[in-house]
Image (tube, coloured by chain):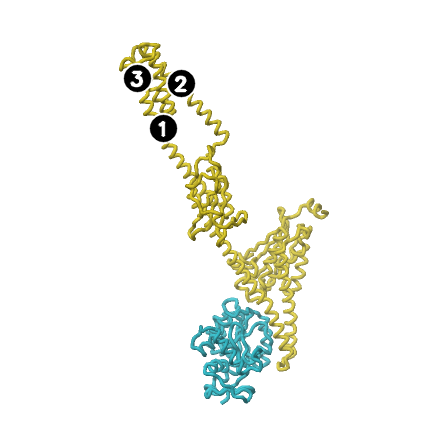
Chain colours: A yellow, B cyan
Amino acid sequence: MLPDQHDEGRRLNKTNHAWALDVAIFLIATAGTYVAQWADRPITAVLVYLSGVILIAVHSGLFAALGSAIAASLVYNFFLSEPVFEFGVTTADEAVPLIAFNVTALITGLLVGRLRDSVDRASQAQFKTAFLLTVSDRLQRALKVEEVEAVMRDLLPRQGVRSVKIFLSQGDLFLRPSTGEIVTYPIGQEPMTPASAGTLDPIVLELTGARGVIGIAQFHLAEAGSDRPGIPDLNSISALIALAIERCVLLDEVAEARAQARSEALKDSLLSSVSHDLRTPITVIEAAAGALSSPAIRLPEEERAALLASIIEQCHRLDRYTSELLDVGRIEAGVSPKAMQVVDLGELANLALRQARTLYPDVVFERRLGDGPVVISANPAMVEQAIFNVLDNAGKYGAGAPVSIEVEASDGVAQLSVTDQGDGIDGPDLKRVFERFYKGSARRASEGSGLGLFIAKGFVEGCGGSISVESPASEGRGARVSLRFPLLQRDERNNEARP
Amino acid sequence: MKILIVDDEPSIIRTLRPVLSALGHDVLEAVDAKTALAAVGVSELDLVLLDLGLPDADGSDLISTFKKKAEASVIVVSARHMETDKVRALDQGADDYIDKPFGMEELLARIRVVERRRNEARGKEPKVLQSDLLRVDLKTREVVLMGEPIHFSPKEFAIFETLARNAGQVVTQRRLMIAGWDDPVVDGQYLRSYIAMLRDKLEVDPSDPELIVTESGVGYRLTEPLVQVD
């Protein structure tokens, strides 16, 4: 890890402690030796001193060991060996301890140094591996090439790499997705290997994936100095980057293919809906008008009247479909907050009911409204249309049986539900009734466009509400569609009424 | 004729039924494939007006049943003007198709062609096909247009003969390629240049053809109402 000021301070402190300990060992050993010498145990005295030198060598390495060995030689020679207070070696007995001190210090120091080096190397290797693991772990979570670059820019400075730029190959050029910067390869030079590092030129490495070279990474090293803990393994890092980028590119392609398929499916359903729902009424109108105007076709009077009536009916149908397509456009445009008003959900239900009764004169619509207004904030035209679409659906598929509409307020929720007694909606259809152009499998033959409930959902959600459907509604029959809105409390009403 | 209308739109059946009845046809109706197939077993049919977009099946999958079991002619009526759908339906044996919306006169004309061809088919192999304008002798390979003899190369005649035998109905490119080259996937450019040669010899204004019209992406139609004479 790159040492900062704080680390630096700690390291100095640690060095002081080490010295103090060495000196302490030396003094203790000296005292021990003096005691042994005084007790007339010269061999023990030498061994005690020797132990001190070995301890210092193990603790502080070669130079401290040699230093203490020389100091021990001097002290021993001057203070402890006969003649006392005099330097000089006259007998072999005097020379042996001095040689032993220094040889022991030398050998122990060298061994300790070597051991330390290999421990250092191992921990450095472990550190690099740990770093690569961290890199690979962080890259796992990157979903975009920009994120890959951000992760590397975050992690690499700890490794003495000032910054990194990632470029993707685009034909002959290279594009940096995070900034849009474009460069020609190889940025004015051949790609270099990490071996030529040391200069401050950026190092450029190719990113090679399963499909060949997919891009390049440009590493800017920090200035060489004590701050830099050596060059990280840029080849391995590049391989990790390449892997991550390849995954990002594949993810992009998958997402793109999915979006493409979705838009194709939507286009397809739009095409078939428009061709079916617009052309059917036009076909009826053209064929009926053609039959009425042809001198070759002689029709009884009541048949002529029926054809004229169907022309008018199909014109209404065309008009309804046009409105629906416009409603879909309004959903896509979104609901403006300015169009939100404080309204009574029961009042809107009444308005929608009036329309539904005109369209389905034979169907009984039972109205169950509570006492007093159920006040919500919504776009009244949209919610009325949504309620009408739900009623229209119930009228169409309710098998002629009564349809009930209920409005109630409880626990801060305003709820409107419409229940029919038709055949209900099959499980698989139930999940999809609110989809655009979706018609239930048993219902495709009828004249619906598949937009009614889609529009209802769009309008209700646009006004901050929610819509749901359950089937069977009761006794194994029918379906119930429920609209829910947040209920406005009394004070909120006043605030919103006078904005 | 006995005509079955297969369409998931009740309003279309309601409009066609009185008109076809007034012209003396027996009209049956079906709003889905299931009902349509049931009708095949019950009574003889001459013609099926078939909408391809049925709620319970793809209409073109019913064509071979109508052709084989009921020996009925099939006119495809479809709102989705997709060439691939039309070609597929024609390859499966449909006699003709008409796009929605259609003029009533147009539909009745197509029905008349089917009626005439069904009557002819009951007789023997045609020798001569004739109209006010055009006379085609299938034995001697003589073609006469408004009293003028027209000379065709053998390949030109082979293609023209296929159009003439199906006069009034669309003939797919595939069928014309088989007639001319015995190869359904021959380069379409060959067929286009032979059609151009036929038009040069037959049309008043070959750049604005009225006799041999192109059905975009599907094939060609000889519009002259040729009838079989013996």
* Extreme-right residue of the structure: A498
* Extreme-front residue of the structure: A188
Disc nearest the viewer among 2 and 1: 1
Count residues near mark 3 (Cα–Cα under 10 Å), then give few for <14, some for 14-19, many for 20+. Answer: many
**Secondary structure found at label 1:** helix
| Location of residue A320 by image quarter | bottom right
- Name which of mark 2 and mark 1 comes first in the sequence: 2
Alpha carbon of mark 2 to alpha carbon of mark 1: how far? 22 Å
Number of marks in picture: 3
> Which residue bears the numbered disc 1?
A113
Residue drawn 43% across the image and 52% down it: A212
Q: Can you say whether A450 is above or below A188 in the image?
A: below
**Three-letter residue code for mark 1:** Gly
Mark number, residue B72: none
Q: Chain of mark 3?
A: A
**Three-letter residue code for mark 3:** Pro
Count residues near mark 2 (Cα–Cα under 10 Å), then give few for <14, some for 14-19, many for 20+. Answer: some
Residue drawn 64% across the image and 82% down it: A295
**Secondary structure found at label 2:** helix
Q: Is residue A104 visible?
A: yes
**Secondary structure found at label 3:** helix
> Which residue bears the numbered disc 3?
A97
Same-chain status of marks 2 and 3:
yes
Residue A326 image position (x, y, % from top left): 64, 61
Q: Chain of mark 1?
A: A
| Location of residue A354 by image quarter | bottom right
Residue A258 image position (x, y, % from top left): 50, 56
Mark number, residue A24: 2
Of residue A38 and residue A421, the one placed in the foreground of this image is A38
Q: Chain of mark 2?
A: A
Whether label 1 touches label 3, CB < 8 Å: no
